Amino acid sequence: MRDIQDFVSDYIKGKKHLHLEIGMVTKGDIEYHSFGNPPKAGGAAPEHRLFEIGSLTKLFTSMLLLELQHQQRLSIDDTVSKYIHQGKNDYLKKITLKHLATHTSGLPRLAPNLSSKKNRYNPYVDYTEQDLLAFLADADYTDQIGSFEYSNTGMGLLGYILCKVTDSTYDALLKKYITNPLNMMETAAVLNTEQNSRLVNGHTSTGKVMPHWDLGGVHDGAGAIKSSVYDMSLFVQANLKEDHPLASAMQQSHVPVKIGDSDLYLGWQEDTALDQAILWHNGGTFGFTSYLAINKEQGVGVVLLSNYCFGSAARVDEYLDAIYKFFTKKDLYPLTFLEPVGKNILESMMK
């Protein structure tokens, strides 16, 4: 077991209710580390606790897109208008499923008609299929097509289309094409009773408990999945190997596609670590943070799941900290983010 205490010491400081689970992955081995509250007597082992993984869901949605293309159910170059028939909106004839998966459709991060006033701590729960279609009826972001703008709306729309194509729910698609083939039995968009008993509470950095998110079906493809570090480590390992049913789709997702003058990935983001390319994604809800990264060159990867997230619907953490710091000249809540912790751990594996 590696000693990674130094990498996490700043992050875990002051988090009374913390569960931080880390998977360090190679093609042939997985090593788990747990920080924060110890398991309760008779409770699930740390690697089997369940967390909201937020936007890591987008990786799964992109894999589903590629897998369905492999089965000739659709093409990533299909236009959105092939599946969404909203009046005479020519904009939908100009954007493709590939645009949605690479955040280059021009669609905004959130649709203008999505209001969190009814339930600001669970902002997507009341957004319906009718709301989405009403927005798309006259949406026109033609001028932004081809430019990168991170869009929960776009990835939610992609998941919605995949469900229409297969006449299925997102959770059923996930099980059929990804989690069952990879033996990820702790990963789902909709938890059963036993799984729900292992879902930990999420917190803001003040320690305030946040309600779990319900993506309402329409945004499932953008962030509905719950999972464990055990399962997510299997997912990381599958991305490093080529001897499983999803290998073709996964390997294709690691190859950039040309959008205008840019090389972009379906689902993934690209960065460098120790002058080598890494593929990564992060995720966050109002109570959870997640991070995943792989380095194909050395065949290593890392995943981190935390039940703390900085910021809430009212950004209360930052305001409280600013007020406290004004009077005391000290930070109330050390604003150490999960992404650099994960990247530092990955770099340690690459040395």
Image (cartoon, rainbow, N blue to C red):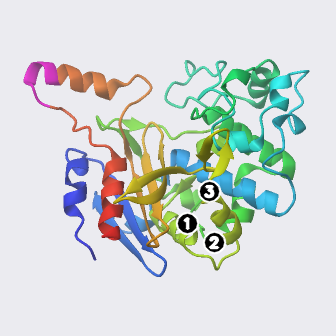
Q: CA distance from mark 1 to mark 2?
A: 8 Å
Give the residue type that dot 3 points to: Ala
**Left-right relation of 13 to 108:** left
Residue placed under numbered mark 3 in the picture: 188
Q: Residue at x 45, y 36 (%)?
A: 286
Q: Is residue 167 visible?
A: no
Mark 2–mark 3 CB contact (< 8 Å): no
- Confirm whether residue 54 shows in the render: yes
Neighbourhood count class around disc 3 (C-alpha, 10 Å): few under 14, some 14–19, many 20 upward: many
Question: Where's the C terminus, which quadrant?
Answer: bottom left
Write down the region rendered in magenta.
325-330
Q: Which class describes the residues within 10 Å of circle 1: few (<14), some (14-19), or many (20+)?
A: many
Residue pointed to by mark 1: 235
Q: Which residue is mark 2?
A: 182
Q: Main secondary structure of the magenta part?
A: helix
Q: Earlier in the sequence, mark 2 or mark 3?
A: 2
